[in-house]
Image (cartoon, helix red, strand yellow):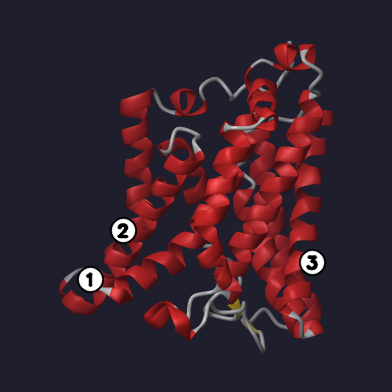
């Protein structure tokens, strides 16, 4: 049983962090389809930074800064240049996927996997069988709670929601919607960096091309499935992780009796099911955002 829970926490923690990034962006009125690109940027920067500097802490800071810069770039394209946010988000994802491959080729002279000499700090033997999990796994529930407090119980959260739903009303109380969106995207960029760092350095200590494998889009689906709420989006992300853990367990139990590709595809099937169920229960994307989907000011 412990093995299953550990597998769920390891695979679910990156999804939770990237889902929180999507929730914050959603509150500000932005459909953030660039989560995948920022997540793989964070994963690459963490491993490459550790290889080059020997410091996991410094490499994590570099990852956060790069993802924050990517978020600022996304904000400039969407807010200042008034580009379509869906296309801009997909462009950011393409930039992250292609840019990391180019960086690996330029730095190491090959496109193979890169191994780091160290990973994220572990929570320690005091936690028994769970001692091999990283500190980001331990911090995850606290960060979810703090995000809920920030979005749902503070003046900042109310102004952020108003900036996404009613920009004119937000300006009437002194909030600047464009600035609120910038702050939201930068915070989300930091969460994407944490997601990438946990994926690459939490247990594997390795980076390979396209290793996010659609997890950024799964996080975005968790935002919709969770109705744009940080707690429910977290549960949705963990649901996808549970399905993935079941698939891995099924491979060990059933072997070749069930097609291997089908078991590997279970998390993505669950993602499609979650989107469909959200559409049935809440009216799809509109129900998930509660009106936060419109970016243009009146």
Q: Which mark is residue 62?
A: 3
Identify the residue under disc 2. 243
Q: At numbered mark 3, what does the secondary structure look like: helix, strand or loop?
A: helix
Decide: is 121 above or below 238: below
Which residue is at a point 37% across and 25% down the rendered structure image?
Answer: 282
Q: Residue at x 59, y 81 (%)?
A: 205
Image quarter for residue 284? Answer: top left
Extreme front residue here? 126
Image position, residue 26 (x, y; %): 59, 33
The quadrant the N terminus occupies is bottom left
- Mark 1 in CB contact with mark 3 (< 8 angstroms): no
Residue at image mark 1:
250
- Residue 253: name its quadrant: bottom left
- The number of discs equals 3
Instruction: Select label 1 or label 3 by which is in front.
Output: 3
Mark 2 or mark 1: which comes first in sequence? 2
Asked whether, in this view, residue 297 is left or right of residue 238, the answer is right
Depth check, front residue: 277 or 164? 164
Q: Position of residue 216 (x, y in %)?
A: 55, 53
Whichever of labels 1 and 3 marks the residue nearer the N terminus, that label is 3
- In the image, residue 28 lies at what x, y percent? 66, 30
Query: Which quadrant holds residue 296?
Result: top right
Whether residue 276 is visible, yes or no, is yes
């Amino acid at each position: 049983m412990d093995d299953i829970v550990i597998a769920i926490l390891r695979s679910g923690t990156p999804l939770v962090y990237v889902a929180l990034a999507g929730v914050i962006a959603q509150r500000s009125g932005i459909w953030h389809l660039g989560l995948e690109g920022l997540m793989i940027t964070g994963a690459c920067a963490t491993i490459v930074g550790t290889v080059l500097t020997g410091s996991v802490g410094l490499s994590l800071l570099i990852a956060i800064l790069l993802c924050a810069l990517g978020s600022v770039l996304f904000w400039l394209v969407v807010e200042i240049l008034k580009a379509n946010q869906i296309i801009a988000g997909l462009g950011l994802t393409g930039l992250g996927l292609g840019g990391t491959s180019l960086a690996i080729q330029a730095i190491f002279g090959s496109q193979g996997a890169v191994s780091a000499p160290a990973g994220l700090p572990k929570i320690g033997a005091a936690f028994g069988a769970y001692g091999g999990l990283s500190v980001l796994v331990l911090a995850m529930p606290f960060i979810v709670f703090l995000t809920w407090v920030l979005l749902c119980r503070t003046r900042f959260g109310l102004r952020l929601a108003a900036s996404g739903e009613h920009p004119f009303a937000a300006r009437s109380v002194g909030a600047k919607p464009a600035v609120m969106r910038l702050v939201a995207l930068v915070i989300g960029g930091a969460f994407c960096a944490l997601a990438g760092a946990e994926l690459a350095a939490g247990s594997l200590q390795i980076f390979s091309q396209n290793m996010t494998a659609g997890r950024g889009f799964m996080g975005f689906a968790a935002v919709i499935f969770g109705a744009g709420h940080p707690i429910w989006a977290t549960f949705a992300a963990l649901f996808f992780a549970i399905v993935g853990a079941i698939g891995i367990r099924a491979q060990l139990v059933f072997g070749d009796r069930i097609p291997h590709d089908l078991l590997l595809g279970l998390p993505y099937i669950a993602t499609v099911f979650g989107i469909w169920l959200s559409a049935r229960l809440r009216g799809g994307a509109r129900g998930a955002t509660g009106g936060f989907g419109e970016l243009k000011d009146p």
